[in-house]
Image (tube, rainbow, N blue to C red):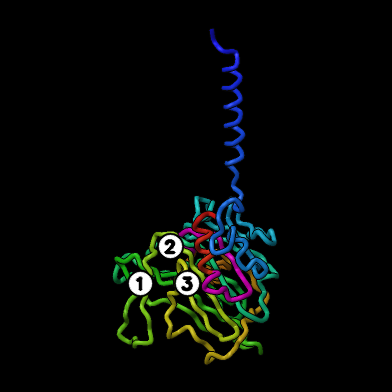
Amino acid sequence: MKSKFFPFLLALGIAGSLVLGFSSCGDDDDDLPPIDGYNNSNEVAATNLLAHWGFEGDGKETKSGTAPSKTVNGTFVTGAKGKGVKFDAGFFDYPRIPALEIATGSITLSAWAKISNTKETPTGGSTISPIFSIAGGPNANIGNLALFGNTHGLTSSDSIQVKAEFHFDKGDGTEFGGDAINMTKKEPWMDDTHTVDPNKIGGKWAHIVYVYDGSTANNRIYVNGVKISNSAWESRNGGNPLNMKFFTPTRPIVGATQSVANGTNAEPWNAALKGEVDEIRVYNKPLTVAEIGALYKLEKAGR
């Protein structure tokens, strides 16, 4: 004789399994062990975050809700964390976002990017692949600040030269310019003060961070949590304090410099991005090495 209790116990077991299954399928980062003391990337320097682009199916800047005023050849694809945006010689151009009009201080730009080597022949030219720029000011191409990558003459390498260039207001209306960059190979003119970092991230997702510290006028670049910028060029203004102050009005652009976005560019090296971008963040402080490392680990883990 079959037991009358067996179907009941079976049903109870299935129900219990379903309950346990649903309760364990949550995606709450608080249920995961912290990484370097943080549950997710939004917790890193949270009070200093000015702007964030997650590209989760749209181009809006998430803190202000600002949508791009012009989009060219951008599609949403699987990114470094969730979705990202892929440009085929394209960009997103935005209207003014007041929070980004930095008046006095420092800045950190953080982004994930996948950029391929653009120099196809030894005699061919290399084009800039802009990741993010902040337009404004007298410099027609770069604007206040731009973060980009190029190949620096390496035709068969997966190395990418990452560069950030600034042209901001020195405080008296005059322009103060400079840059941070990694050297991908030893040049004949370089002495022992110049570091070399091949930076083999061509065609791969990489976490790229630019820091300008107004207290020392020092600027530097990190890739995947490691500093790669040329040490000989990191210090500006003689190492004396110089706060970053953007020329206004200004606006952010993803994937192009201001002259490309506004149609005035006449330079062959200056082109819209062919590549992918994700998780752009702008802070009004120089992130520490620990914060940069935590942000890299968290976003790499999808958090």
Q: Quick one: label 2 or label 3, which is nearer the N terminus? A: 2
| Circle on res. 198 | 1
Q: Distance between the residues labelled 3 and 1?
A: 13 Å
Q: How many marks?
A: 3
SS class of the residue under badge 3? strand
User: Which residue position is annotated with label 3?
Assistant: 222
User: Residue placed at 64% from the left, 60% from the top?
Assistant: 61
Amino acid beneath label 2: Ile
| For residue 284, side relative to residue 110 (left or right) | right
- The kind of residue tagged 3 is Tyr
Percent across and percent down for residue 188 are 30, 85
Judge depth for marks 2 and 3 and give the one in front. 3
Q: Which residue lies furthest to the top in this view?
A: 1
Magenta part of the chain: 273-291
Crowd class of label 1 (few under 14; some 14 to 19; many from 20; radius 10 Å)? some
Say which residue appears at 58% left-offset and 27% top-offset: 13
